[in-house]
Image (cartoon, helix red, strand yellow):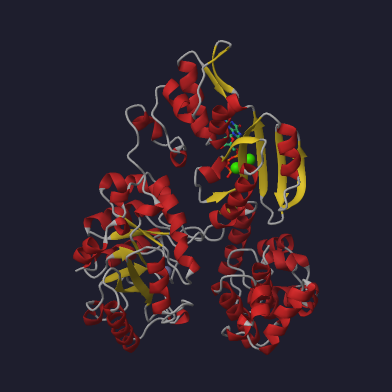
């Protein structure tokens, strides 16, 4: 882990620990802010200390600076270690339960002595929480649900937690002289929104040498298995990595097998069987004879199929079209021309409007649809009407500077409880576009929530629907909602649905996209960026659009600037 990431992690944990301790909230918030600030800067902590850059960082005062220096010099922060040691490990585990924050955990620990998940579960089941202030029957039920979810999610990782490791390991494998070919397989190659582990397939004539180097990879925490054809290691992040080595002539079959999905493989094997052949990880055979294929494309062809991109190998509808034709080209990151849904320091973003615009422009994109939070989202610095006017003035000025780039005036308007938007009509009319999103009052029946969101979709000012299900991956499921009705309403009202590309959300889910595409839905791959690095999250959203089988024409922000001007005009 880089020293910057270690510092961010420790500061975030300090904020939590201080809350657990019941310290002055300002103290805790200072750590949260400092962690966010560190995130904003490129480079390494040790470099910033040497160069003095640390002194110009916002919100990092004398005492925090001293702690960062201590971290670089000693590898730890004493105050953090002491505070961490003052709480049982189980209590820290409890904080992973969705819906249980440090404040509630502190009460449970202090009042009932609860310091691990199993005891908390039992206490909930026996109504022990009810006498505590702020805990009701509903709270207990929520916590039980949270515990169940946590157990289900445990051992899975979001794309952003897995992808950087995959890139590093594949580069390291590729650099080895004994490795003839290597590819990532498994759920990450298929671009699933969460993955259990990483799977690599290597073609080599010297498997022992490859495996020996693999199990000693610098990121390794421990070795689970070490053999000539199959090894597994656990990384320090807790992520497992499986590596298979095969002979070069077996490579395409092995890659196909270990890419999956399991369900897709089952159908493929059945197709082989129907044609008097046998397909497995070692080859495609007619009797004992290998049907020679030098690529996955040739294996598909041997089974009467066009190539199926890995993202689509989920045994959903890929065999229907692959029998007839190639899939139309899937959208690519390079098709994206601009972005919508980004926050600035006007609300809860950490970069200024100008910084966000310049960063977007530096990425080769040609427009930025800025959408700070609306006034009801006061906790996220939602904009007052005066602040909107001020922001619009700044946008007009900035737009004078560029001919080939434009900032569009947007807002992420809260969808209020009754489905209305957050400002009077004459204010809404001043925006180029509006994203409507649910941020509060999640506790509704599916009928109520669906009606609420459809009302927002039907509002003539609404351009896009933001993170339609509200899910947070590995943390919080979608609120109850009839997503198909929402998609139908969006199409009927010419409203775009975003694919929120934040790796915690990836919402709309890829499983719905096929339905949307057939019905004529237009989506927009939106970063929901709160920082400059957050803009790059569109890579995850593009992956999800591909997994949903979408081409560039289905994605609004693949249109060029003149087209967007016309559409929003
Ligand atoms: P994950 O790791 O849970 O996110 O999902 P996968 O798909 O990466 O699953 P994993 O790592 O257990 O296995 C990698 C691939 O190997 C999987 O996609 C298909 C293949 N595979 C594994 N076990 C089986 C099996 O029992 N039958 C078949 N047909 N294929 C399997
Ligand atoms: Ca896997
Ligand atoms: Ca695996
Ligand atoms: Zn939002």
- Total labels drawn: 0
Residue 496: image location, x then y, percent = 29, 59
Up/down of 172 relative to 408, above or below: above
Q: Quadrant of the N terminus?
A: bottom right
Q: Which residue: 68% across, 28% down?
A: 205
Left or right: 105 in relation to 323:
right
As displayed, is residue 329 above or below residue 103? above
Q: Residue at x 29, y 74 (%)?
A: 402
Seen from the viewer's position, the closer of residues 550 and 334 is 334
x, y (%) of residue 48?
64, 77
Q: Position of residue 554 (x, y in %)?
A: 30, 51
The extreme top residue here reads 287
User: Is residue 398 in view from this perspective?
Assistant: yes
Q: Quadrant of residue 301?
A: top left
Image quarter of residue 5: bottom right
Question: Can you tell which quarter of the image residue 569 is in?
Answer: bottom left
Residue 523 or residue 92, whichever sits in front: 523
Name the residue rendered at 55%, 57% in the picture: 160
Q: Position of residue 417 (x, y in %)?
A: 36, 72
Q: Is residue 131 visible?
A: no
The relative height of residue 75 versus residue 54 in the rendered view (above or below) is above
């Amino acid at each position: 882990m880089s020293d910057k990431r270690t510092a961010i992690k420790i500061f975030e944990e300090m904020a939590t620990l201080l809350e657990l301790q019941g310290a002055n909230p300002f103290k805790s918030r200072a750590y949260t802010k400092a962690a966010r600030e560190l995130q904003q800067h490129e480079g390494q902590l040790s470099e910033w200390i040497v160069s003095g850059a640390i002194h110009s960082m916002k919100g990092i005062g004398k005492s925090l600076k001293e702690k960062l220096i201590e971290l670089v010099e000693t590898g730890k922060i004493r105050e953090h270690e002491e505070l961490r040691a003052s709480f049982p490990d189980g209590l820290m585990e409890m904080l992973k339960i969705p819906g249980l924050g440090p404040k509630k955990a502190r009460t449970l620990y202090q009042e009932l002595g609860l310091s691990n998940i199993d005891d908390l579960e039992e206490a909930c089941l026996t109504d022990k929480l009810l006498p505590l202030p702020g805990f009701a029957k509903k709270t207990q039920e929520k916590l039980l649900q949270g515990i169940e979810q946590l157990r289900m999610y445990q051992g899975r990782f979001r794309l952003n937690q897995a992808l950087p490791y995959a890139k590093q390991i594949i580069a390291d494998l590729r650099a080895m002289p004994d490795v003839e070919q290597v590819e990532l397989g498994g759920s990450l190659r298929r671009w699933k929104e969460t993955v259990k582990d990483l799977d690599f397939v290597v073609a080599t004539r010297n498997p022992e040498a490859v495996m020996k180097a693999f199990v000693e990879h610098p990121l390794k925490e421990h070795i689970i298995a070490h053999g000539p054809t199959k090894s597994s290691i656990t990384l320090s992040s807790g992520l497992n990595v499986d590596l298979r080595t095969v002979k070069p002539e077996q490579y395409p079959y092995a890659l196909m097998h270990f890419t999956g999905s399991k369900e897709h493989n089952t159908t493929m094997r059945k197709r082989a069987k129907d044609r008097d052949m046998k397909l497995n990880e070692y080859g495609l055979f007619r009797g004992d004879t290998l049907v020679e294929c030098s690529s996955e494309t040739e294996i598909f062809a041997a089974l009467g199929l066009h190539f199926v991109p890995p993202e689509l190998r989920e045994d959903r509808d890929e065999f229907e079209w692959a029998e007839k034709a190639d899939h139309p080209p899937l959208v690519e990151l390079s098709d994206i021309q601009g972005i919508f849904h980004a926050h600035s320091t006007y609300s809860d973003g950490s970069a200024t409007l100008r910084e966000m615009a310049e960063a977007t422009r530096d990425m080769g994109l040609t427009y930025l649809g800025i959408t700070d939070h609306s006034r009801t989202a006061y906790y996220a610095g939602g904009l007052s009407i005066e602040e909107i006017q001020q922001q619009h003035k700044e946008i007009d000025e900035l737009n004078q500077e560029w001919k080939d780039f434009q900032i569009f005036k947007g807002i992420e308007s809260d969808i209020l409880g009754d489905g209305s938007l957050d400002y009077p009509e004459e204010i809404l009319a001043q925006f180029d576009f509006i994203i409507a999103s649910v941020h509060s009052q999640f506790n509704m029946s599916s009928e109520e929530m669906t009606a609420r969101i459809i009302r927002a979709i039907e509002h003539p000012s609404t351009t896009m629907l933001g993170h339609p299900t509200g899910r947070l991956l590995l943390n919080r499921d979608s609120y109850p909602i009839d997503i198909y009705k929402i998609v139908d309403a969006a199409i009927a009202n010419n409203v775009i649905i975003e694919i929120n590309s934040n790796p915690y959300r990836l919402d709309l889910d890829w499983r719905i996209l096929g339905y949307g595409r057939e019905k004529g839905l237009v989506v927009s791959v939106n970063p929901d960026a709160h920082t400059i690095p957050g803009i790059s999250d569109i890579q995850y959203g593009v992956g999800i659009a591909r997994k949903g089988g979408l081409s560039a024409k289905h994605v609004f922000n693949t249109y060029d600037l003149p087209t967007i001007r016309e559409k929003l005009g």
